[in-house]
Amino acid sequence: MEDKNDLMEKIVSLCKRRGFIYQGSEIYGGLAGTWDYGPLGVALKNNIKNLWWRMFVDGRDDMYGIDAAILMHPKVWEASGHVSGFSDPLGNTRFNLMFETKVGTGEEATKSYLRPETAGGIFVNFKNIVDSFHPKLPFGVGQIGKAFRNEIAPRDFVFRTREFEQMEIEYFIRDSEWEKSFEEWRTEVCRFNDAVGITKKSVHELEVPDSERAHYSKRTIDFEFDFPFGRKELYGLAYRTDFDLSAHERASTVELKYQDPETNEKFTPHVIEPSFGVDRTVLAVLISAHTEDELGGEKRTYLKLKPAIAPVKAAVFPLLKNKPELVGKAREVYAALKKEIPQIVWDDNGNIGKRYRRQDEIGTPWCITIDFDTLTDDTVTVRDRDTGEQQRMPTVELSSLILKKLSVIV
Ligand code: ATP
């Protein structure tokens, strides 16, 4: 147990020291349940979100992306059941987790909420997507965005926060197809875990029993992860039946049905919902990547991040900082590479060994050193983060080597 707490402490401190994640409003003493992503954190997070979008939206013919407003008509949350039921027990009462806010001014102001999940924005746009794109069933709508919950006890770093991000899909199907579709998405969730580098053996599927499932769900699997503070939910996969579209149709009085173009039959689609938390992904990725080993007789800590999601893909070094010809050549290599691979950095601080350690600690897969040989034969050394091995290669081949490794998703 001690070791595990230790690991969390190491990750939290690395995140702060190296600019991944800071406490929200830190100079004012912090605001519970909020965290700010620093330069490396936002890069890691964006890489994760981009990979998700590429896998599940751009990479498929049956998916549509949206970006709905965070503020929605309050009736959305009445219809979805959040106003009456989205609460946790607190003392003898139940405490609704939605943040209330006022939209408009004075007498005109109406009470609304910061959305507690992104899914609502998808359901209310179902008709828009159908009218604009005429998709054939099955099809899905994906969205990435912020969600807010006034959690009673925010804790465990970015695991349980009051402001977080979700990546959600509502996949619309015929009710007869639900089992097949559920299985397909179950496989897709695992594929995503592999792609971002979440340790397979630390993920466990929990079949949520009838008594604990939301009333509208006929089947839910929680994908749990062995966090240092316990085995906890990472993602959810739920068969939500036709509950949401039917509820929004009743409350809005706008028909939310699908008409089969061949048979003209009209019906309310059912839905499979894979729901991914961005921040929990970031945490599970960091925990999975955190590695301690010995290299060249020295202990080191490094993040074994997949190159596709590493915040920095490569660091470029001049061997010596005080040799203008080396620095000039290194700047040239750096500028050319940065045009093709923007997530690279320049580092000329301290000796090469220190630079390697610094890059290892933030998970940079490759370090490129420009030395005296470069000036004569235009080759550089490329050092691999995981093995520490160095390889000499022509400068002109650098970008294609890196780009090739970055494009390997799984
Ligand atoms: P929990 O039981 O841990 O509170 P939940 O079952 O309420 O989670 P869902 O409503 O299924 O969570 O939300 C979908 C996903 O959103 C979760 O799997 C998780 O990744 C993420 N998520 C939910 N609440 C939070 C939070 N407070 N902080 C960070 N991520 C969250």
Image: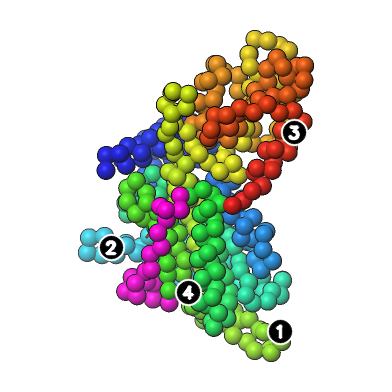
Of the residues shown, which amino acid type is indicated by label 3? Answer: Glu
Q: Nearer the viewer, mark 1 or mark 3?
A: 3
* Mark drawn on residue 397: 3
* Magenta-drawn segment: 199-218
Whole-percent x, y for residue 355 in the image: 55, 23
N-terminal of the pair, mark 1 or mark 3, is: 1
Q: Is residue 287 left or right of residue 189?
A: left
Whole-percent x, y for residue 403 in the image: 69, 41
Q: Tell me if residue 165 can be seen.
A: no
Of the residues shown, which amino acid type is indicated by label 4? Answer: Arg
Disc 1 from disc 3: Cα separation? 52 Å
Q: How is the image coloured?
A: rainbow
Tags 2 and 4 touching, CB below 8 Å: no
**Depicted 212 relative to depicted 116: above or below:** below
N-terminal of the pair, mark 2 or mark 3, is: 2
Tags 2 and 3 touching, CB below 8 Å: no
Disc 2 from disc 4: Cα separation? 24 Å
* Mark drawn on residue 261: 1
Disc 4 from disc 1: Cα separation? 24 Å
Of the residues shown, which amino acid type is indicated by label 1? Answer: Pro
| Disc 2: which residue | 89
Whole-percent x, y for residue 164 in the image: 47, 51
Q: Which residue is at a point 37% across and 69% down the rendered structure image? A: 208
Q: Which residue is at a point 73% across and 12% down the rendered structure image? A: 325
